[in-house]
């Protein structure tokens, strides 16, 4: 989980909210209607446009597991970090600063499958969110891709999101291996001389799947 720095809410999204006064998440359409079906003077906005903004903000990765995601309703889900509780808190439902993008959490995986991220979280609250900078210091990873909570808040969050499952551990391990080893047999670590500038370079890359686990693994190599 990496810390997400929220930008300004899209102006068009705010205008749509002001003009339409939505009461339910379903009031926000999935897509914009064709140009020839739009009424003059009506404010339009859609989940598709909102996903675009959130994906750009997050580097096209899931806010929880950091898996690569794209703008498709079956792949990327607009997540309410603070649960929307059955649409009873209208202002919070449409608060841009409570919204992020989650992957589909394995819902489309073949059976047997283990759900994770928003698909597993549902309406359960989490103590440590990607909007809280503590997520980068209270959650760490091993070189083998296993996620570790360093505090009770982190452990609770990892459990609720089901982030410590073989599927995600394996994906993180594969991503890490591409940076920390210099040989195909995965026996030789990158040198400390090469490690330091690589960390600095990767820190500047926004669209990097499993970025947190890669950087944590490189930091461990750097201390060997």
Image (tube, helix red, strand yellow):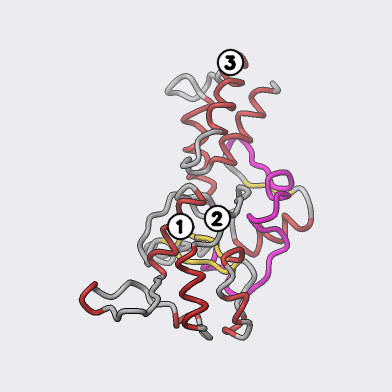
Residue picked out by circle 3? 191
Q: Residues within 10 Å of mark 2 (few under 14, many from 20)?
A: many
Quarter location, residue 31: bottom left
Q: Magenta stretch?
A: 118-144
Residue 216 lies, with reference to residue 224, above or below; the image says: below
Residue located at (57% from left, 33% from top) = 203
Is 108 placed above or below 42 here? above
Disc 2 marks which residue? 63
Q: Secondary structure at mark 3?
A: loop
Estimate the x, y position of residue 178 in percent, counting from the top left: 46, 30
Earlier in the chain: of badge 1 and badge 2, it is: 1
- Between tags 1 and 2, which lies in front? 1
Q: Is residue 53 above or below residue 2?
A: below
Most extreme residue toward the front is 41
Quickly name the residue at label 1.
Answer: 53
The disc placed on residue 150 is none
């Amino acid at each position: 989980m990496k810390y997400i720095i929220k930008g300004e809410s899209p102006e068009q999204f705010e205008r749509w909210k002001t003009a339409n006064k939505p009461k339910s998440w379903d009031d926000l359409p999935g897509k914009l209607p064709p140009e020839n079906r739009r009424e003059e003077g009506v404010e339009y906005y859609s989940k598709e446009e909102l996903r675009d903004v959130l994906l750009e903000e997050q580097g096209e990765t899931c806010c929880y597991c950091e898996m690569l995601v794209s703008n498709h309703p079956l792949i990327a889900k607009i997540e309410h970090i603070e649960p929307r509780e059955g649409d009873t808190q209208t202002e919070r439902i449409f608060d841009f600063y409570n919204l992020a993008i989650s992957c589909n959490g394995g819902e489309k995986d073949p059976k047997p499958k283990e759900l994770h991220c928003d698909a597993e979280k549902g309406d359960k609250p989490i103590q440590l969110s990607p909007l809280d900078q503590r997520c980068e210091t209270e959650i760490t990873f091993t070189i083998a891709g296993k996620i570790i909570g360093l505090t009770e808040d982190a452990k609770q969050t990892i459990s609720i999101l089901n982030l410590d499952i073989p599927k995600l551990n394996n994906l993180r391990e594969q991503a890490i291996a591409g940076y920390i080893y210099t040989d195909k047999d995965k026996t030789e670590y990158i040198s400390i001389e090469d490690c330091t500038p690589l960390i600095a370079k990767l820190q500047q890359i926004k669209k990097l799947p499993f970025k947190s686990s890669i950087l944590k693994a490189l930091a461990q190599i750097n201390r060997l």
